[in-house]
Image (cartoon, rainbow, N blue to C red):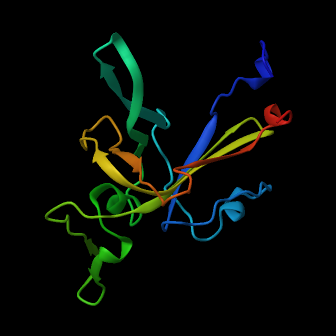
Amino acid sequence: MAGNNASEIRVAGTGRILVAEVGAALPTTFTDNPAADWGTGWTDLGYTSTDGVTFSKKDKLDAVETWQSISPARFVYADRDLTLKFAMLQFNEDTLPFFLGGKKTDFRNDNTNNPGVYEFDVPDGPTFDERALGLEFTDGSAVTYRFVIPRGQVTATDDLKLARKAAAMLGVTFTALSPGEGQALATFVMKDGAYATV
């Protein structure tokens, strides 16, 4: 509804980020058990930095110039980038491959001769590691937002700083890829009374 309405201001008080196989089911059910709503195919990446998630949508428009006018006659859509940027604080079999490229099954260990020691190889070159990505945040007990990218990949990583006075962070930028003709690049699912007039 148009006009000033403080109840429609949203603050992402707390949230989480999840990953799954490409094309994982979109969670549209909202119960008292959010983990069950997402289903077993989704993996929670755990703690992230207090910066939360930076959501970015950038469209590139190419101007069509004409001889008859100084101003463009029209624009042509040339590109769309949809990205989520965040930093993971936990180091485990889910987060490290997500940051470096690879999968959980790439870890090796020899429990017979060297128990408790694990190895993970950093790939020699870029790897195609496509995933589905989910974002969920709540604003109080009555409002929950979910945002799902059905197909995408980590396209940039932040420098990994190891220091005495700060937690190490695995910062990534995840970029949406086209899931196919006629399908949405991403989808919002909201439990929010602000949309009751739709």
Q: In which quarter of the image is residue 163?
A: top left
- Position of 54 with respect to 195 (left or right) is left
Q: Which residue does the image show at 48% across and 34% down from the upper left? A: 50
Which quadrant is home to the N terminus? Answer: top right
Residue that lies at the very extreme toward the bottom in this rendered image: 112
**Total numbered circles:** 0
Q: Is residue 38 above or below residue 71?
A: below
Quarter of the image holding residue 166? top left
Closer to us: 102 or 80: 80
> What is the residue that sits farthest to the top in this orientation?
70
Residue 115 visible in the current orientation: no
In x, y percent, where is residue 193? 83, 35
Considering every residue shown, the one lying at the far left of the view is 124
* Residue 191 in view (yes/no): yes
The x and y percentages for residue 120 are 24, 69
Residue shown at 49% from the left, 38% from the top: 53
Residue occupying the far front of the picture: 68
- Which residue occupies 64% across, 33% down? 13
Q: Nearer the viewer, residue 134 or 115?
A: 134
Observer-nearest residue: 161 or 38?
A: 38
**Residue 179 x, y percent position in the rendering:** 48, 59
Which quarter of the rendered picture does the C terminus lie within? Answer: top right
Nearest the camera: 193 or 80? 80
Residue 135 lies, in percent from the top left, at: 56, 48
